[in-house]
């Protein structure tokens, strides 16, 4: 078994993804930033590097849009 040895041994919470988790983020924020990713209904989700990247990209763009708003 080639199980990874991350500190907490957690996997990405996105359904269908089993890469090692890198970060935990607020579920609401995550699912609004990455709507095509299904996550369980807990408050925070642990996400892998790839999903975290997607999340970061989206949130950056949102911040820009907010600025343009005023
Ligand atoms: Zn993932």
Image (cartoon, grey):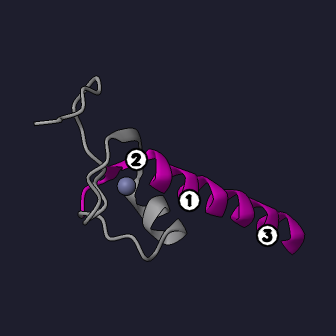
Place of residue 22 in the rendered image (x, y in percent of width and height, measured from the top left): 41, 38
On screen, 20 above or below 12?
Answer: above
Place of residue 12 in the rendered image (x, y in percent of width and height, measured from the top left): 31, 50
| Number of numbered discs | 3
Which class describes the residues within 10 Å of circle 2: few (<14), some (14-19), or many (20+)? many
Report the residue at 39% width, 70% height from top. 37
Marks 1 and 3, the one that precedes in the sequence: 1
Q: CA distance from mark 1 to mark 3?
A: 17 Å
Q: Circle 2 sits on which residue?
A: 48
Report the residue at 46% width, 56% height from top. 51
Element carrying mark 3:
helix
Q: CA distance from mark 2 to mark 1?
A: 10 Å
Q: Which residue of the protein is positioned furthest toward the front in this rendering?
A: 1
Q: Circle 3 sits on which residue?
A: 65
Element carrying mark 2:
strand
Q: Give whichever of 56, 5 is nearer the camera.
A: 5
Mark 2 C-beta to ligand 1 under 8 Å: yes
In which quadrant of the rendered view does residue 70 lie? bottom right
On screen, 33 above or below 60?
Answer: below
Mark 3 and mark 2 in contact (Cβ < 8 Å)?
no
Marks 2 and 1, the one that precedes in the sequence: 2
In which quadrant of the rendered view does residue 17 lie? bottom left
Report the residue at 17% width, 35% height from top. 3
Q: Circle 1 sits on which residue?
A: 54
Q: Is residue 55 left or right of residue 41?
A: right
Q: Give whichever of 2, 51 is nearer the camera.
A: 2
Q: Which residues are the magenta region?
A: 41-70
Place of residue 33 in the rendered image (x, y in percent of width and height, measured from the top left): 54, 67
Report the residue at 33% width, 50% height from top. 44
Can you see residue 44?
A: yes
């Amino acid at each position: 078994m080639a199980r990874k040895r991350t500190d907490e041994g957690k996997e990405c919470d996105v359904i269908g993804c089993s890469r090692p988790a890198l970060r935990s983020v607020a579920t609401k924020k995550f699912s609004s930033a990455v709507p095509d990713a299904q996550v369980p209904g807990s408050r925070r989700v642990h996400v892998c590097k790839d999903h975290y990247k997607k999340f970061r990209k989206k949130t950056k763009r949102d911040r820009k849009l907010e600025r343009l708003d005023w």
